[in-house]
Amino acid sequence: MATERLNLPAVVASVPAGDAGWQGAPENTIVGHVHLRVGRPEDAEAWWHDEFGFDTVAKYGGQAVFLSSGHYHHHIGANAWHSAGAGRRDPARSGLAWVEMRSDNVKAETAREDPWGTVIKTVPGKA
């Protein structure tokens, strides 16, 4: 899996003159994948396999793992780049507290917590 550096000057130059700036994500925005900070990518890999049946797409040593369903390049990235050895997240601190996934294979909303305290919600419906 290759990565390209974001060309920030080009992104800034693409903003039209007089633009009001960030106004929040539009209603019904869909995010294709998320990256989660974890203490041990190996533990995250096992959790996503066991809980959701996700497949491992790529590993970057003991630093990161990328997982998906349906042969997608990845839906979940779990890395320890700034969180090696971390335990459960402190709910009083800022950060990602939950992720919602849609599936036409579920009938009712469910919620599970990963080992670091991130709530993973699964809701009925297609993305």
Image: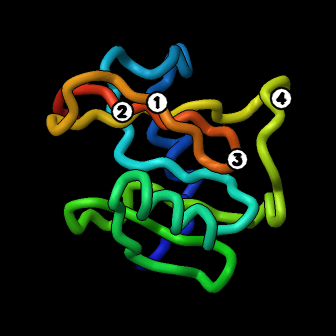
| Disc 4 to disc 1, C-alpha distance | 21 Å
- At horizontal 83% and vertical 29% (from top left) the residue drawn is 93
Task: Of the two numbered discs 3 and 1 on the same chain, state the one appearing first in sequence.
Answer: 1
Quadrant of the snapshot with the C terminus: top left
Q: Amino acid at mark 1?
A: Ala
**Total marks in image:** 4
* Secondary structure state at the residue bearing disc 4: loop
Residue 80: mark: none
Contact, CB < 8 Å: mark 4 with mark 2?
no
Q: Which residue is mark 2?
A: 122
- Distance between the alpha carbons at the discs numbered 3 and 2: 18 Å
Of the two numbered discs 3 and 4 on the same chain, state the one appearing first in sequence. Answer: 4
Residue that numbered label 3 is attached to:
116
Instruction: Decide which of tag 3 and tag 2 comes sooner along the chain.
Output: 3
Question: Looking at the image, is mark 4 or mark 1 nearer the viewer?
Answer: 1
Number of the label disc, if any, that sits on residue 111: 1
Task: Tell me residue 37's x, y (percent).
Answer: 68, 53
The amino acid type of the residue labelled 2 equals: Thr
Q: Mark 3–mark 2 contact, CB under 8 Å? A: no
